[in-house]
Image (cartoon, rainbow, N blue to C red):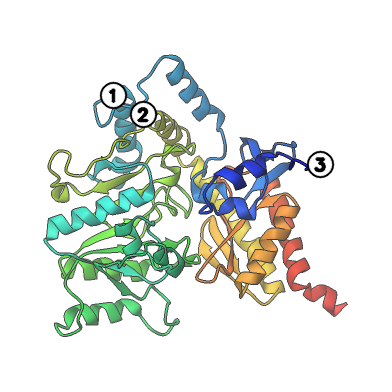
Amino acid sequence: MATTATITPINTFERVESRVRSYSRSFPKVFDRALGSTIFDTNGKAYTDFLAGCSTLNYGHNDPDLKSALIEYISNDGIAHGLDMFTDAKEHFLSTFERLVLRPRGMTHQLQFTGPTGANAVEAAMKLARKVTGRTNAIAFTNGFHGVTLGALAATGNGKHRGGAATPLSGVTRAAYDGYHGPDINTADLLERELSDPSSGIDAPAAIIVETVQGEGGLNAASPEWLRQIQTIARKHGALFIIDDIQAGCGRTGGFFSFDGMGLSPDIITMAKSLSGMGLPLAMTLIKPEHDIWKPAEHNGTFRGNNHAFVTAAAALEKFWSDDRFISEVKEKARYLGERLAAIADEHGLTTKGRGMMVGIDTGSGENAAAICKACFAKGLIIETSGSFDEVVKVLCPLTISLDQLTAGIDVMETAFDAVLGSHRAAAE
């Protein structure tokens, strides 16, 4: 008599969902509830979240004030979808963003709501830069990650993702990121020389797009001096200077923008991920007024204004960015996190990377990093990798995490590093 396979939720995913899924392969559990920095599986086991939706949940899961604002809005039959029509939710977000983010920084950027993902924002930014300048070439950097739709993917360096396009990717010239050739070579000088040489073979660029910290590229952090030089190069050569702040923004690296305090004035900024404050899809480009030359509906999308996300985004701005308390707490946690990771790295002869609360440890190989993350998951810690070879164990915990939970999570990391790489202390004994 034939036996029937046991039906489980995991079987459903294996049977029905596309093979393109990825994070579920590292964390093969079914989760059903989350609060703050903790996710629970369907068996009730608690996991500390050091992934936070790849920096989509900077304010944690289900923040009570953001949740309350959304529930109230839905209960009052607030507009859920309105294309790009005027709604009270959009007006409140726009005025709040202007008051708490733009005006304190002397910024006059216009806000364009694109499709709901960061890649959509990048596509709009590059498209607009080409429209403004009349040029087609864009400069992007080694190890950069800007999305996987074709235009954004052309600017992305990752070979695996580029290979998924199955078509030529054009319109982008790759330049070396800060430190790519080692500490003794200024890659901005190399770019300036190439763009100034009419026989370098590099077409005059419409834009130079850069991440201040490369999230998926391995937590490479550019220096303020290098970034200022890249901005100067863009201005000199008539290109728009674009900062991709999708993963590094919203407090992750020390300010609302990752470039706060660096003396930068990007022509276009792309944002998504934690912009909504609660994991709801919302993306936008910030455009200097002189470059906002779009004709009506020239770049659009059905979901270019998520009113539920406007509600939670405005609530997040009011709660976390009305004064300096939140970012002061984040900077203190970042200091502690950096010290703890440096101690773990030193124990194993490794190095730390990143800035703020966007940091990690270069383990030397993808195999090491994967084994460490697997050991962490077994002990109730969700954490992932990044880098050219997935060699960096990357910490992206919610910025609102308590110091106690942060400490406990790092303790799990320390144990996992010792288990996989061996403890120098144990060897000495």
Q: Are marks 2 and 3 in contact (CB under 8 Å)?
A: no
> In the structure shown, which secondary structural element does the residue marked by tag 2 occupy?
helix
Report which residue position mark 2 lands on: 307
In terms of depth relative to the viewer, which is nearer, 263 or 398? 398
Instruction: Report the quarter where the N terminus lies.
Output: top right
Q: Quadrant of residue 295?
A: top left
Residue 397, given in percent of the width and then of the height, sits at 58, 50
Graded by Cα atoms within 10 Å as few (under 14), some (14 to 19) or many (20 or more), the crowding at tag 1 reads some
Residue 407 appears in view: no
Is residue 271 positioned above or below 179 on the image?
A: above
> In the structure shown, which secondary structural element does the residue marked by tag 3 occupy?
loop
Precedes in sequence: disc 1 or disc 3: 3
Determine whether, in the image, residue 103 is placed left or right of residue 47. Answer: left
> In the structure shown, which secondary structural element does the residue marked by tag 1 occupy?
loop
Q: Quadrant of residue 205?
A: bottom left
Determine whether, in the image, residue 334 is placed left or right of residue 215. Answer: right
Q: Are marks 2 and 1 in contact (CB under 8 Å)?
A: yes
Report which residue position mark 3 lands on: 1
Three-letter code for the amino acid on which mark 3 is drawn: Met
Three-letter code for the amino acid on which mark 1 is drawn: Thr
Mark 1 or 3: in front is 3
**For the residues marked 2 and 1, what is the alpha-carbon distance in whole angstroms?**
8 Å
Residue 356, given in percent of the width and then of the height, sits at 51, 57
Precedes in sequence: disc 2 or disc 1: 1
In terms of depth relative to the viewer, which is nearer, 12 or 387? 12
Residue 83, given in percent of the width and then of the height, sits at 27, 31
**For the residues marked 2 and 3, what is the alpha-carbon distance in whole angstroms?**
55 Å
Report which residue position mark 1 lands on: 87
Three-letter code for the amino acid on which mark 2 is drawn: Asn
Graded by Cα atoms within 10 Å as few (under 14), some (14 to 19) or many (20 or more), the crowding at tag 2 reads many
